[in-house]
Amino acid sequence: MILFKKITFVVPLFFAFAVLSYSDVQASTSASVGYFNNKSNDTRLNYLEVVLPNSLNTALKQKFRIKSRSPRILAENLKKDDLLLKKQYSEIELPKLSESLDTDYFIYGDFEVAGKNMIKLEVNIYEVNSFRIFTFTDYGHLETEIFKFIDRVAAQINGIISDEKKYSGEVIKNNSAIGIITNLSGKDLNELYYGFMKQNYSVKNFQGNTLNNIISECTINNFYYMSSDYASYRLIARKEDVKMFYNVWTEKKQMDELLNLKRIYDKYAFNFTKTQNAFIDKINSIPNTKIDYLIIIGFDDDHETAWIRCINMSNKRLIYTQSEIESDTVSSITQKIIDGLQGKQNKTK
C-alpha cells in the first residue's frame, strides 16, 4: 500500500523559487499585436483602440525590424482555429492562447484618461509558450504628440523582447545612495562595489549578517521576477494548477515538508508582490542604511553573465531590468550595468 502519494505539479517547479536558466532566454524577433482596450468612460477615445495597436505594429516593423503582425492579421489567424481576438485577456488565458499563436510574443493592453489630452497606457508583453509576462505603464500626450509616444513605447518593447530583457523607466543619477544585493563575495564583491563608488554612487553595505537574516529563505534568484505598480516581470500563477496530494496515513515529516512547500508557493508565486514589499520595508527599517535605490544583481557560476533588477525605494517601483549582461570580468560587467542605469549605450567589451 502506498501511504503517501507523489506530489504532482502541473506548473513547473521554478514557479515558486527558481530562475530562468540563461540558455532559456532566446533571441526573439516576432510579435503579434492585439487590441488596446479603452478603460475610460470617454467613448470619444475609442478611435485609439485602432490607432494605438496599428501604429505600434508599424513602429515595431519599420523602426526595430521586428516581424510584427497587426490585430487584423492576428484575428484572421485565430479565426482559423475558431477563436476570436478579444479586447481583453486574463493572464490565465494566455498559455492556452499560445497554441494558436505562431509568433514569439503577444502584445496587448489598455488605456485610460490621465489628465487633459493625456492617456495612461498599460502594455502587456506575453512570451508565447511560457508562463512569463512583462507589463509596463507609460503616459503620453495625444494629437500631435501621439506618434512620438508610440515610438517611445515601441523602443521599450524592443528592449524587453531582446535577449537582454531590458526595461528602463528611470535614469539613476551617479550621486544616488544605493544598496546592492548580489551573490558575489570576496574580491569579486569588492570589484562590484568599487565600480559603483568610482562613479560617485554612495554604496551602502548591508550584504552582511543583518541582510542575510532578512533573506534567509531566499536565494538571489528569487528576485529575478519582480512586480510593482508601473512595471513587472512575473510568472503567471494559478492555484488550481498546483496539486499536492496527501491522505490520513501521511507521516508527520512528510506532511511538514508538504506544508512547507505550500508556504513557499504562497509566498513566492501567489503573493509575491506582498512578499517583495515586506522585504523592501525591512531593508528600509535597517538603521543608518537609507538608500534611494535597491539594486539586485545575480551572476552565473562563472561570473561572466549577470542580470539586474533595480527598485526605487521611495515608491517601491521596479524601474530597471536587464538580463544576459556578458563579459569576461566582473569589473567590465559592472561598467555595463552602470552604463545601463545611467541611460548610456553599453560600449564596454
Image (spheres, rainbow, N blue to C red):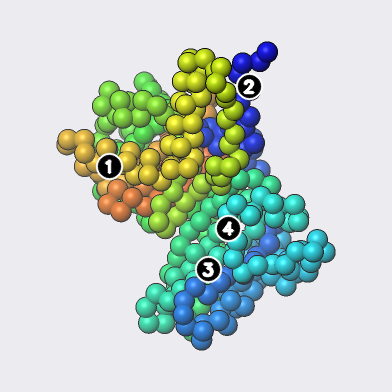
> Which percent across, then down, holds residue 185?
38, 23
Per the image, the residue denoted by label 3 is: 110
Residue 52 visible, this angle: yes
Q: Residues within 10 Å of mark 3 (few under 14, many from 20)?
A: many
Badge number at residue 281: 1
Eyeballing the image, is 7 above or below 23?
above
Per the image, the residue denoted by label 2 is: 5
Marks 4 & 2, CB-CB < 8 Å contact: no
Which image quarter: residue 210?
A: top left
Mark 1: secondary structure: helix
Q: Which residue appears at 37% of the width and 44% of the height?
A: 274
Q: Residues within 10 Å of mark 1 (few under 14, many from 20)?
A: few
> Which percent across, then down, holds residue 329?
48, 30
Mark 2: secondary structure: loop
Per the image, the residue denoted by label 4 is: 90
Give, as a three-letter code, the residue at label 2. Lys
Callout count: 4
Give, as a three-letter code, the residue at label 1. Asp
Residue extending furthest toward the front:
248
Give, as a three-letter code, the residue at label 3. Asp
Q: Which residue appears at 62% of the width and 37% of the height?
A: 11
Mark 4: secondary structure: loop
Q: Which residue appears at 48% of the width and 68% of the height?
A: 121
Distance from Cα at disc 1 to Cα at disc 4: 30 Å
